[in-house]
Amino acid sequence: MSEEKNREDLDGKSGIVSVEKRRFPRFNVDLPMKYSEVKVRKKQGGIAHDASEGGLLVYLQEKFPIGTKLKIEVFFSHGFRLTPIKAEAEIVWADIRGPEDWGEYKYGLKFINIGKDEFSKLKGLLDNLSA
C-alpha cells in the first residue's frame, strides 16, 4: 500500500490538496478601469475582477498579445469619491471569455511600474478587503 492510501485508511478522509503558487493573495473586486497601450492616448473602459499587490485579473474590450504593456487606472471608492490607482502593467496571460465577436477578453496583468503613492493606495484597498 502507498503512504497516501495508509493515511486515507487511518483518518477515513481523502482528497486533493491544492497549494497556492502566487506570491500575493488575490482579492475579488469588480472595479471600473481605463486602459490604453503605453504609446497610445485613446483610453478604453474595462473591469478589474480581482487584485493583488502583484497584478490584476481584468476584462478588456480589445484583443492584445501577451507581453503588451498598458497604462491603467483602476477606480475605487474612497470616502465619497472615486479614486484612481495608476500604474503600468504587462499582459502575462490571455484568454477569450466569450466568442471573439463579443469583444470581451480576459487578461492577467503584472504591475511593471507603480509609484510609491499609487502602491500605498492599492495596499490600503487590499488591506480593507482582507479585514
Image: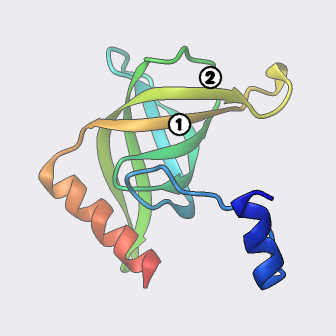
Residue type at tag 2: Glu
- Residue under label 2, please give it: 62
Quarter placement of the C terminus: bottom left
- What residue do we see at 35% from left, 75% from top? 127
Residue in view at x 77 percent, y 34 percent: 97
Residue labelled with disc 1: 108
Seen at 39% across and 37% down, the residue is 110
Determine whether the residue tagged by mark 1 lies in a helix, strand or loop. strand
The residue that appears at 47% across and 40% down in the rendered structure is 34
Tag 2's secondary structure?
loop
Q: Is residue 10 left or right of residue 83?
A: right
On the rendered structure, is 77 left or right of 104?
Answer: left
Residue 123 spot, x, y in % from top left = 29, 65
**With 73 as the anchor, is 9 left or right in this view?**
right
- Scheme of colours in the image: rainbow
Considering the image in quadrants, where does the N terminus appear?
bottom right
Specify few, some or many for label 2: CA neighbours under 10 Å numbering under 14, 14-19, or 20 or more: some
Q: Position of residue 50 (x, y in %)?
A: 54, 55
